[in-house]
Amino acid sequence: MQQKLQTRAFERVASLLHPGEQPIAAARAMVGAFTASRAGTIAHHGVVLAGAGAGAAALAAHRKQFVVVTNYRVFFLPQTILGGPGKTVLAELPRTQVALAEAKIGFASILRLAFSGTDGVSLTFPRSDQKNAVALAESLR
């Protein structure tokens, strides 16, 4: 299933790629503050979904994203309700401005991406997406 989603994410950014630019990896993740902890991100996400009903679904939709890494840039796409990549690009950054600051692979994997000029973001992956977290980390090294 993940291979299908990754292919779809590559297709979403294909029209935006520069000549010679190739997609390397794509994965879905919960995006949070750079300083967010694994347990804190998971607990906050669970409380928001359990306590706020339909309004929380809109908040969670902004936190759940697809990250696509190419040899030149990193793209952030929204996730659809079914977990696939959305059609719009939320942000794109040159690879020269994105650094993998930390990778903790485990029950809930987390990658911290540092952006030049700002803090950065943390990407949290559930256990089912652990292989995707590893692939994304490798593509950013």
Image (spheres, rainbow, N blue to C red):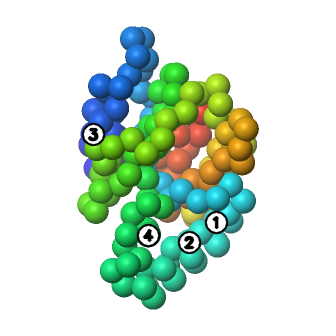
Q: Looking at the image, which is closer to me, 58 or 14?
A: 58
| Secondary element at image label 1 | helix
Asked if residue 57 lies left or right of residue 130, the reply is left
Q: Amino acid at mark 1?
A: Arg
Q: Which residue is the site of mark 4?
A: 59
Q: Which residue is the site of mark 3?
A: 8
Q: Earlier in the sequence, mark 3 or mark 2?
A: 3
Q: Earlier in the sequence, mark 4 or mark 3?
A: 3
Q: Amino acid at mark 2?
A: Ile
Q: Amino acid at mark 3?
A: Arg
Judge depth for marks 4 and 3 and give the one in front.
4
Asked if residue 22 lies left or right of residue 120, the reply is left
Q: Looking at the image, which is closer to me, 14 or 25?
A: 14
Is disc 4 surrounded by few (<14), some (14 to 19) or many (20+) residues within 10 Å?
some
Q: Which x, y percent locates residue 90? A: 43, 45
Marks 4 and 1, Cα distance to the nearest angstrom?
A: 18 Å
- The answer to whether residue 97 is above or below residue 64 is above
Q: Looking at the image, which is closer to me, 17 or 137?
A: 17
Marks 1 and 2, Cα distance to the nearest angstrom?
A: 6 Å
Is disc 3 surrounded by few (<14), some (14 to 19) or many (20+) residues within 10 Å?
some
Q: Which residue is the site of mark 1?
A: 38
